Amino acid sequence: MVRESSWFVRRLLTLVITASLTLGAFIACPAAAQPDNRITVAVLDFKMGDVYKWWTWNWDVSGGVTALVTDALVGKGQYRIVERSRITQVLGEQDFGQSGRVDESSAVEIGKLLGARVLVYGTVTEFNFASTGGIKIGGVGLGGSKARTKLSGRVVDAQTGEILGSIVGEGEETGLSFSLNTYRGISFSAKEFKDSTVGKSVEKAVNAFAEDAVGKINAASMRLTMDAYRPALTGFVAGLIPNGVIINIGSNAGVMKNQYFDVFRVMVVAGVAEPVRVPVGVIKIVSVDPNAAVGMFESVTSPVQVGDAVAKK
């Protein structure tokens, strides 16, 4: 009886220790059981609009604004932000930006290069600083200044090139007048700049732009997450048109303009257990009806036939 009791106690202790170790490992590594399904967002360099250059020195306004917008977006929604250094490196290697090709027409290619699903890009449309009539403090007259900054941009689906929304951010600030040389050599991240009239107008514009962008990105993230749980979009070629096809699925099934579909032929091959999908082309959707859509050929490897299958890329 004593032996059986001892055996039971040892067995019970073994089970308790094993359960404790298992629980400890689970607590120590909770992230392993929860994959990161957030979308990836890349903020591209802002362009300078038709802005009067009131400063006489070399000042990277677009770079400074891009960095501030990127920082303002971090941690604000269900997405990851691509590091600016990686964006600069990748786009520099591909000669984007210098050629002026950074827009929705090149979004698909840029998205693939950066591994981003959503792109944010914009333009500095206003960046003004001027002296005003002056103000009085304690009976003492002081010169005044006024600064105004305005940013405009777009959020784009890097998989389809679809514009998900337009964004605007504006900021205006008045304060004491400073010599223009006060800003010489000061970066946008410096405290002196942030405390200045110009810096405060930039901060207001950036915060407004980022807040608008977060709403558009989060809406896109929710839609893309829902799309991921929908059945795969599949159909077949119902008709042929010059340089394109008509497929038998439309908006009722979730088809949207600018989506890409693979066109393939299903063949039964002797000795192969499963039917083989033979690629015959790629189409881009240009028009959508409730139960049909029109796709134009992006590439064709062999003549497309009525009855060929299509599936969303």
Image (cartoon, rainbow, N blue to C red):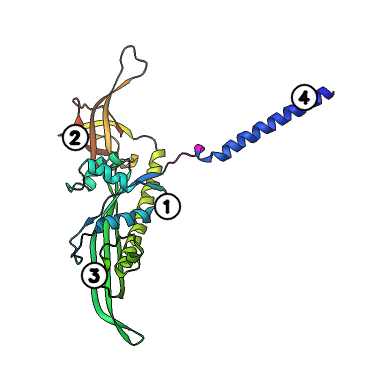
Pointer 1 residue: 75
Residue 68 drawn at (x, y percent): 33, 57
Q: Secondary structure at mark 3?
A: helix
Mark 3: amino acid: Leu
User: On the image, which quarter does residue 126 sit in?
Assistant: bottom left
| Distance (Cα) linking label 1 and label 4 | 54 Å
Pointer 3 residue: 180
Mark 4: amino acid: Trp
Pointer 4 residue: 7
| Distance (Cα) linking label 4 and label 2 | 77 Å
Residue at point 16% right, 34% down? Answer: 243
Q: Residues within 10 Å of mark 2 (few under 14, many from 20)?
A: many
User: On the image, which quarter does residue 63 sit in?
Assistant: bottom left
User: On the image, which quarter does residue 167 sit in?
Assistant: bottom left
Q: Secondary structure at mark 2?
A: strand
Q: Residue furthest left?
A: 242
User: Which residues lie in the magenta part?
Assistant: 32-37
| 304 shown above or below 52 | above
Q: Nearer the viewer, mark 4 or mark 3?
A: 3
Q: Is residue 15 left or right of residue 36?
A: right
Q: Nearer the viewer, mark 1 or mark 2?
A: 1
The answer to whether the residue labelled 1 contacts the one labelled 2, judged by CB atoms less than 8 Å apart, is no
* Residue nearest the observer in this picture, 218 or 88: 88
The answer to whether the residue labelled 1 contacts the one labelled 3, judged by CB atoms less than 8 Å apart, is no
Q: Secondary structure at mark 4?
A: helix
